[in-house]
Amino acid sequence: MAFVQVTRGRGITKSQYDAVTRAAYGGKLAEGEIFRVAGPGKDAWYVIDGWVSRELCDRSGEKLMSAFQKTGIPMPSMAVEEFDIHQHLKAEGG
């Protein structure tokens, strides 16, 4: 079942986020990723991902952990929440 994952990472900067995601996914969405939205919040960096399945999300997480090791960027303290996708609307032309 498709779901959304909301991740709050403390102690990561925009440039670190960009470097890790570029190393993990080459500037594209991961396999099985429906969308990704990321940006700074008051006290952390937030990433909101839509996934088609748990299996593909977990596989992506393995690539992400490997990318943290490759780049030498320390893994941030993360809090994760998830919920099932009931509806996903897009703007026309989007």
Image (cartoon, rainbow, N blue to C red):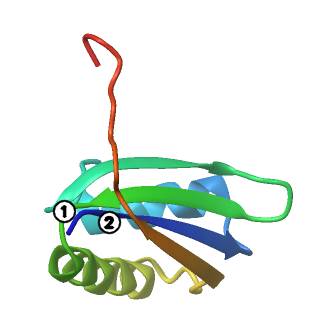
Reading the image, the residue beneath label 1 is 52
Q: Amino acid at mark 2?
A: Ala
Quick check: can you spot residue 22?
no
Residue depicted at 55% across the width and 79% down the height: 73
Q: Which mark is residue 8?
A: none
* Residue 14 horizontal/vertical position (percent): 63, 53
Q: Secondary structure at mark 2?
A: helix
Q: Nearer the viewer, residue 58 or 26?
A: 58
Residue depicted at 53% across the width and 61% down the height: 17
Callout 1: 10 Å neighbours few (<14), some, many (20+)? some
Look at discs 2 and 1 and give the one toward the viewer.
1
Q: Nearer the viewer, residue 73 or 4?
A: 4
* Residue 48 horizontal/vertical position (percent): 49, 56
How far apart marks 2 and 1 lie (CA) works out to: 22 Å
In the rendered structure, the answer to whether residue 1 lies left or right of residue 61 reads: left
* Residue 22 horizontal/vertical position (percent): 34, 57
Asked if 35 appears above or below 25 in the picture, the reply is above
* Residue 26 horizontal/vertical position (percent): 24, 55
In the rendered structure, the answer to whether residue 43 lies left or right of residue 1 reads: right
Q: Name the quadrant of the N terminus.
A: bottom left
Asked if 78 appears above or below 91 in the picture, the reply is below
Quarter of the image for residue 81 reads: bottom right
Q: Name the quadrant of the C terminus.
A: top left
Quarter of the image for residue 15 reads: bottom right
Reading the image, the residue beneath label 2 is 23
Q: Secondary structure at mark 1?
A: loop
